[in-house]
Image (tube, helix red, strand yellow):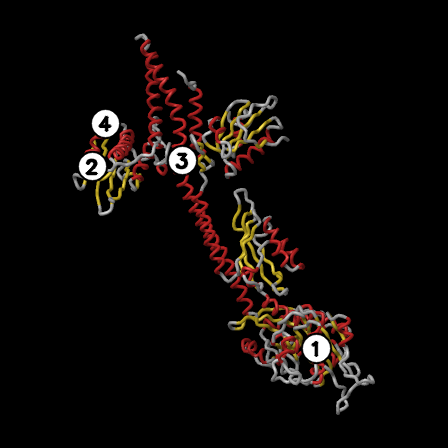
Amino acid sequence: MTQRKPTYEQLEARLAEFEEITTVLRNGEADAVIGKSDVLLLRLRKVEQKLRESEKKFRFAMEATNDALWDWNIETNQTYRNPRHATMLGYEPHELNASQDEWDKRIHPDDKRLLLELVDEHLTGKRDFFTHEYRLRTKSGDYIWVLGRGKIVEYSDDGAPVRMIGTNIDITERKKTENSRELVTRILQYSSELGEWISIIRKVLKSIQEYSELEVAALRLREGDDYPYFVQYGFSDEFVQAENYLCERNKAGDIVRDYAGNPVLDCMCGNIIRGRTDPKLPFFTQGGSFWSNCTTELLANTTEKERQSRTRNRCNGEGYESVALIPIRAGVEIIGLLQLNDRRKNCFSLELIRLFEGIAMSIGSALERRKALEEVLALSKFPSENPSPILRIAEDGEILYSNKAGLELLAHWNAKIGEKAPEKWRCLIKKMLESAKPGLQEEEEEEVKDKIFSVVILPVVESGYVNLYARDITERRKAEAEARDAQQELIEQQRHEKENVEAELAKLRDELVKTTRLAAIGQVSASIAHDLRNPLGSVRNASYFLRRRLSKDEPKASEHLKIIDQEVARADQIITNLLEMARPKASHKQVVDLAEIVEQVFGQAKGIEGVRCRTSLVPDPFMVKTDPNQLRQAISNIMSNAVHAMKGHGEFLVEATRDSDYDTLVFQDTGPGFDPEVRDRLFEPLITTKASGTGLGLTICRQIVEKHDGTIHAEDCKGGGAVIRIRLPRQ
Amino acid sequence: MSKPVESTNAPVATTAGKKYVLRLFVAGDEPNSKKARENLTQLCETHLQGEYEVEIVDVLEDFEAALKSNVLLTPALIVVAPKPTTIFGNLNDTDKVLGALRLSGGKS
């Protein structure tokens, strides 16, 4: 009696504690188990690794795709962007600093506020996702337009967003087309406005500068002998002063004239105004315009002769790499030019120049007439060349005019020039002309075979007709639909991936709980079994002495002592089982006769007076290579459960069969079968339906079977009763 | 409001004056330990009105303390006063903790 013995109350508390520990372990609320000499961390290592793998797979997929994708961990505020982000902005993937700060700086200052607001609204749940068109700065300092979208794909348990993924799609090209279309619409609108023509020209130039996103839009116009800037946006005062006049002057300050008496005009501007262009050269167009996307290269690679005259090169000197000069004609005479400059290279395409030529033409016509109301009429000069359908329809629905491109639309309407437009259009046109205010316009969509046209209708009330400007938006629609699909697919894919990972996680977690419970029980039992055994010994001794002193005429006290003994024995059994589980067991395999083992077990079993044990072994004798002690233990546990379930009356059947790979042992009883509530967890520790069970019997069975690389299953027998099926590999 | 005192010196003598004396055993920053710490801080501030003293023991740093206190598993909260009890797990079940502290709302 050297050790302080715990009281019964303390023991009880200890057992309750033990119970609580298993619950905590089962619920996955534990982090570590403290053993005698070490702390065992229960961290879900396997799960984490699995997650990382899935993450890696996702990243890999992200890197492979051609879309710019990002993945924002909101908790750590770290964002992964795939390499496409870099290449989209003209960088090599390794060149781009991926930090959020750096990225924020790339967003165009005018677009930033709204973008952040939209993201915020999504984060706070006001929107289901966010989508925004905004500009990003590229390596060269230019901006590209992107369509950014994002969606939260993961929330924490308390509902806070944890992760958002999204895409950035380069829509610069689309924006450009949109812009030029918008520009044409604007100019058409201005042209139909009433007002002073100077202010209209100003508006037109301002729109050109704005929508084409070019630094400079300027207009030279004849004034006496020279062609100074009439309106300009974007040039410095110094530049205008130095470049305002084109006439060459001699030393006396007089204008130099050619043999026909016309002033000699300098530089490329002079060429355009004098019509000195050669469409065979790539920097001149059929329409008499000049354009270059890199003046430095142009000056280095062409001769002055090719450039048609001496050039002052002030544009290039000022850093303007992209330069376009478009003649403005009144009738056949060139009366000025439209100049577009930008310091960035590659601002133009032939298509864009054509558009400017069209605009220049309408400006010329407008100037020639100097009457704003007539300008829409003037526009019909460039429609014939326009690749997009342009139509004019009278109030009564008669088609007055169609350019070449418009014939496709007419064919679809099944109408010719001079005939009536379809009902739908007639109604619309009539309504518009009746209610028309200056500047009014409508936009309609029309499907023509496999194309979609967007048709802008501009009424000219005074003349009683409307002009229709159609544009093929099939490609754009297709691109939009594709982008939407891709986005949807991405989200779908993510969801799948996530579901898979979650399912896998749940599975792993279950498994893990099982294994950690075993490990933990081992640890726990090792540290408490000893503590429990000592007091149990004392109780047993005390009971023994009490019994000896007990007089015979106290049957009640004797009964109580018997209960004490029984319960002590049961507690002892629990401890033994626990130690059995915790102790690492080495298998000593030998070849044994299964029938013999079953017989031994049955012979030692208790309470079997009413139970018949039957074996059906094929082949017979059934020899298995196994650790006989362990097999005996397993069969004993199964049999004890069966006997208990049958309440001591029934039949216990052992069947064994064999194929080339496996031995299959089937144990069947005639009891009521498994309790459905515990069937799925039969093999977990501490699961028991018996009032006096330890809940470890089948756990130990499984442990043994698994040590033999086998599997164990429980099922209900069709005719009632429980079946345990063990499969053991045959080496 | 007094905050939980981070300490690895265990066991610590109960300070007189405070009604509730608690000792929380955690395993570093493992998820459940972290949660238990947060739960305890919130619970103390909500229910114990400054009448408490909390000591946090990290078993990864002070393993002996866990053995001495018979703690088999983390996170574990030992209520030293008013009535000695041990609660395991991440303390998500506020009622259970309140019960152990003999406060209303708990099953005592």
Report if the CB atoms under discs 3 and 4 are less than 8 Å apart.
no
N-term mark: 1 or 4: 1
Given the image, what chain letter belongs to the residue carrying mark 4? A
Q: Which mark is residue A604?
A: 4
In the rendered image of this protein, does residue A38 appear above or below residue A373?
above
| Residue located beneath label 2 in the image | A592
Q: Which residue is mark 3?
A: A517
Q: Earlier in the sequence, mark 3 or mark 2?
A: 3
Locate the C terminus of chain A by quadrant.
top left
Considering only vertical position in the picture, is A730 above or below A427? above
Residue A138 visible in the current orientation: yes
Amino acid at pointer 3: Arg
Query: Looking at the image, which is closer to me, B42 or A556?
Result: B42
What is the secondary structure assignment of the residue under circle 2? strand
* Chain at tag 3: A
Comparing A662 with A359, the one in front is: A662
Label 2 chain ID: A
Callout 1 touching callout 4 (CB < 8 Å): no
Quadrant location of the N terminus of chain A in the rendered image: top left
- Classify residue A70 as left or right of residue A597: right
Judge left or right: residue A475 versus residue A620: right
Which residue, given by chain and number where applicable, does mark 1 sit on? A313
Label 1 to label 2: alpha-carbon separation? 104 Å
